[in-house]
Amino acid sequence: MLKIVLAQFNSCVGDITSNSRKIIANIKSAKAKGADIIIFPELALVGYPPEDLLLKDHFVDENIRYLKIIQEACTNIIVILGFVEKDDGRIYNACAFIQDGKVKDVYRKIYLPNYGVFDEKRYFSPGNFVSFYKFKGYKFCTSICEDIWQENFVKGLRGKSLDFVINISSSPFHLGKMSLREKAISRLAVNAGAFVFYCDLVGGQDELVFDGASMVADKEGNIIACAKRFEEDFLFFKLDRKLNYPINKVSASEDEEAFHALKLGLYDYVKKNGFRKVIVGVSGGIDSAVVVALAVMSLGKENVSALIMPSRYTSKETLLDAKNICKNLGVDYNIINIDGILDTYVQTINQFFKKVSGTKTEENLQARIRGNLLMAFSNRFGHLVLNTGNKSEISCGYCTLYGDMVGGFGILKDIPKMLVYKLADYINYKLGKKIIPLSVIKRPPSAELKPNQKDTDSLPPYPELDPIIKLYVEEDYSLEGIVKEGFEKKLVQKVTGMIDSNEYKRRQAPIGIKVTPRAFGKDRRMPITNKFNY
């Protein structure tokens, strides 16, 4: 029997000192439990993705220096650890095989992903061989993340008489990713005729969230053990060729997955960047209600404050809802009526414009006044402003530059409007009471920047809009391709036209948590000056 530990931990990019302390602490815990092998995620020592830090020689050298320190703790146990290897002027995404206090071998990642959020070819050179190891009568090999997603790598392990394959990963979360991983791991297990030990990273890193769920598959490809999702875990597994293990499937609904991803991504962004508190502009609408609730559930009510900024166009119902949301969550809030500020703006510029009131200019002024107030509180108290815009709005440019687009972090940036509603329901379910009032969920959405305004004055209904955005943004369908899916051509032209013409706004938006398979930002890099509109 072999005792193997999957050390699923939350590293911080660039914090090599703290990462190494956690690695050593995990090694000591594994040794205390009698483990034979402990496995860490991809690039665990430096955090993932380190991006252009890899262009700094002293960063790479520091990671190698700490690897030597870690080696001293690696007695009486095999340690499989992701780090950056440097050799002959090149660097490699590498996996150290440490035994008896020494690095006995290094595996270099063969397949370097260069799509979506990945650009590893910018930094790393590829490896070109697989090492095979023997320990206590077991034969195994190591691999890194993308390797096992590639058919050539998987086929290359056929007939090697392996007992198990180790894969260390830093695989970012998106909705539906779990089932894709399970399929890749199962395919590897069946092709290699071996157990698979898959160790993944957990935690938030800027717009990325890593959900963990490190797992073990048997030779038939069944998932037989799985670590927790969205939190650190220490999965201890006893491998015995003679045993039959029960299947251990992990499943979750879309709203549950999104909730945990947003909660973890927000927490880590705030804590890893040294913020103490956040501030949210609470309007009484669904988006800000979900954001302030997520903030409280992630950071604690004592670390969240709210600013309610009504105008003459704010209905009594939404103002009451804004207050009730804050009261329900126990959040401190201030109310600033913006009418006086708006009047001053209008009076000042009326001498230059024929008309301001009732125009788009007045609408945008209100949004920018609110943005300025939020940033003033941020400057004065050092709070991080949480942006409340959702993916549906930012896709179509239904947002105001330097107004409701302000903020340091966009919680809902990759959340379509219809999923926002599901999150509201899930939050109420999770808390066991109507923290977000039913009136907020049922009321037709409105920016309330002019009398009787509704989102549908400018946008198609969200149940129609969101599927078109998904096809166009996430799946790269053409205009005609979307029409063939059953949508009216004029509607599709309107939506795709709005998406194409508002890239300049998205470039100036705060970063936000990736939740869908393709988010704005690293995932989708479209030119602003662009005349291709098919």
Image: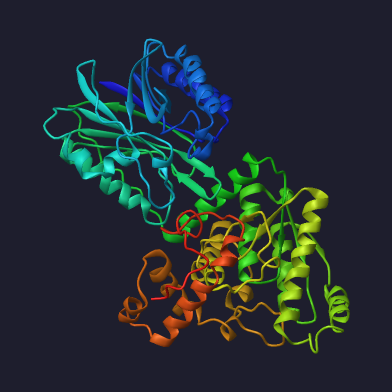
Residue furthest bottom in the image = 354
Where residue 29 appears, as percent x and y from the top left, is 47, 21
Q: Residue 267, relative to residue 313: is it above or below?
A: above
Where residue 334 appears, as percent x and y from the top left, is 82, 62
Front in this rendered view, residue 471 or 9: 471
Q: Residue 138, relative to residue 191: is it above or below?
A: above
Image quarter for residue 433? bottom right
Q: How is the image coloured?
A: rainbow
Q: Is residue 461 visible?
A: yes
Q: Is residue 247 visible?
A: no
Q: Residue 437, relative to residue 443: is it above or below?
A: above
Where residue 461 appears, as percent x and y from the top left, is 50, 81
Q: Residue at x 50, y 34 (%)?
A: 54
- Quarter of the image where the N terminus is located: top left
The answer to whether residue 142 is left or right of residue 348 is: left
Image quarter for residue 131? top left
Q: Residue at x 35, y 77 (%)?
A: 482
